[in-house]
Amino acid sequence: MNRQILAPAAKSVWSREQCDFTGDIYSSGKTIVSWRGADWLLKFKDESVNEVIGYQLAEFLELPLQPWLAVEIGEIEDNGIEKPHLGILVKMWDDKFDCCDLDFPRDSHPSLVGMALALNALNPHDPHWMRNAEKTQLRLVDLEFFGPAIVFSETTYWKDSVDGYLNAVRRNLCRSYEIAKPVEAIFCSTLARLVEVDLMGVVSFSGHSRAGEITEMAASFLKPAQKILSCFS
């Protein structure tokens, strides 16, 4: 089930004019805004590009997510110039929930845990599950470290090292595999899916004013990261 809410004309990223949510978007890196009669968590920081990548890869694997969308937001710099940026809105979950580590619900949801741990090989900082009170439903959250952070200014540049990220993928792949031993079969089959798919056919920033530039930067770390996975699988 596709949980990304696409912009008009099936674009991946909404413009601020198209997405008329209300709230103080500049108060912090995270804030609650209102849109279409519901509350949404707006995450608006350098890692938002990476979180969009994480959500799109999770959707490819059909992992459970809250409804979400990406939106281009102009951020005002100290010199008064507005620079394009990217934020992600995630719908607040109405159910009461707690948070747990990726491997915690392996007895109740082994397939989801195996898939999430395989995806986590590309994310050096572990995401978490939100779990409802009945412990029957999960939502994957905190997916903002798929790649080095991208900073928007007059030009777009890396905040962190691509080589540093790729080294972290190598370490995290081995760690994720060890954690996934109880669900090894689904972990390995999911890893194979991530190796075989055209990742740049999954990841899209269409609709953003710098879509081509962001896509090129994303490809520069996703493709070598995918090659690391292929050496393992």
Image (tube, helix red, strand yellow):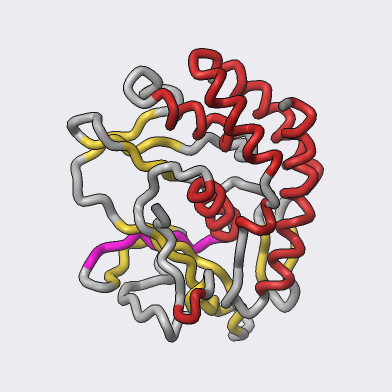
Image coordinates of residue 41 in percent, x first then y, are 35, 59
- Residue 87 vs 176, above or below: the answer is below
Q: Is residue 71 left or right of residue 197?
A: left
| Residue under the image location 60 percent in, 39 percent down | 123
Q: Is residue 226 left or right of residue 99?
A: right
Q: Is residue 15 left or right of residue 135?
A: right
Q: Is residue 31 magenta?
A: no
Q: Quadrant of residue 83?
A: bottom right
Q: Nearer the viewer, residue 63 or 15?
A: 63
Q: How many marks?
A: 0
Q: Nearer the viewer, residue 184 or 148?
A: 184
Q: Quadrant of residue 175?
A: top right
Chief SS of the magenta region: strand
Image coordinates of residue 84 in percent, x first then y, are 60, 77
- Residue 202 vs 37, above or below: the answer is above
Image coordinates of residue 129 in percent, x first then y, are 38, 36
| Residue under the image location 28 percent in, 55 percent down | 92
For the record, the magenta segment spans 38-45
Res. 24 visible in picture: yes
For the C terminus, give its image quadrant.
Answer: top right
Image coordinates of residue 203 in percent, x first then y, are 62, 58
Res. 28 visible in picture: no
Q: Nearer the viewer, residue 30 or 100?
A: 100
| Residue under the image location 24 percent in, 29 percent down | 135
- Which residue reaches farthest top? 182
| Residue under the image location 71 percent in, 56 percent down | 159
